[in-house]
Amino acid sequence: MARLTARRALYAVPVLLVVTFGVFAVAAASPFDPVKAYAGTAALGADQETLDRLRENLGVDRPFTARWWDWLTSALGGDLGQSAVMRQPVAEVIGERLLWSTLLCAVAFAAAVLLGTVLGVLAARRPGSLVDRAVTSAAYMLEAAPVFWIALLAVWLFALQLDVLPAGGLTDTGSERVTFGGLIEHLVLPAGVLAVSQLPWFTLYVRQGVGDALAEDPVRGARARGLSERTVLLGHALRSGLLPVLTLIGSRVPELITGALLVETVFSWPGIASATVEAATAVDFPLLAALTTLATAAVLAGNLLADLLYGLIDPRVKLEEM
């Protein structure tokens, strides 16, 4: 396990270097002007000389390769730079928002895995039954639904029509204090929407995996020995059927991050994703590079976690060979 982790960490270094370089290259080619984004409405009445001087002060008049190298060397020393759009150090921006994004993604991902497992097992028990057709049909419908559409529908139904949950934010209007009860109340809608957007894949994978496992010889043998259907399902078929889901965990991390970006934007959730949108539109090089690096690291960590879980649960897989 330690060898696999070290090898993946070593492989991650060139990936992160390429990603950060690509961020600076794409941002440099962006039609958005970081100087005008920084100055705001004041840039409308400013002359060219003032804009050029501000451009020089922000350092955006230099080639993007030089800016990337300066940012990289400073980041390796622990200095992620200054965010122009947030007007504060990048490390502080990430520190203030990382907790809320992690909480949102963790709750949504756990809910999607647990509910997807339950629904997948129920559908796999009797293939072709009414429950199976209902679960798979709903999963395919949700799979095709854009996450922002689900989010807007949830706001319309639960916040505007039923008025049972807040429409967004972290606290109630006019309040700056975060309480546990208020946090849970404001978390339900965004976490629920994000979980629903991930639910179809886990449901369908579990249904397929458990369905295949129920047709295997070891499971048939367990039934022939007179074991109860519950023991056969939970003790034999479920463990074998969940193996494909472990690989899905790593592959769903990029989609989870993309979904979180949209969900945080719709629900005004003060997380990393909303800061990414602001950094992209303002061409905030240091903040954009740091957030992209963080997202890439999360994807690589998700893939590593999936491989480790697969190797630990499936005795046929040897971690040292991966």
Image (cartoon, grey):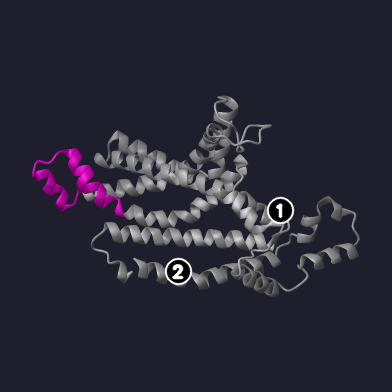
Asked if residue 276 shows in the view, the reply is no
285 is within the stretch colored magenta: no
Q: Classify 275 as above or below 162.
A: below
Q: Classify 168 as above or below 68.
A: above
In the rendered image, which quarter contains the C terminus? bottom left
Determine which residue is flagged by label 2: 9
218 is within the stretch colored magenta: yes
**What SS does tag 1 mark?**
loop
Q: Hey, what amino acid is under mark 1? A: Met
Q: Does label 2 or label 1 sit earlier along the sequence?
A: 2
Residue 249 x, y percent position in the rendering: 40, 54
Asked if the residues shown at circle 2 and circle 1 are in contact, with their CB atoms under 8 angstroms apart, the answer is no
Answer few, some or many: residues within 10 Å of disc 1's Cα (few below 14, many 20 plus, some between 14 and 19).
some
Residue 178 x, y percent position in the rendering: 59, 37
Determine which residue is flagged by label 1: 86
**Which region of the structure is painted magenta?**
214-243
Is the magenta region chiefly helix, strand or loop? Answer: helix
Q: Along the line of sight, which residue is nearer the eye, 102 or 128?
A: 102
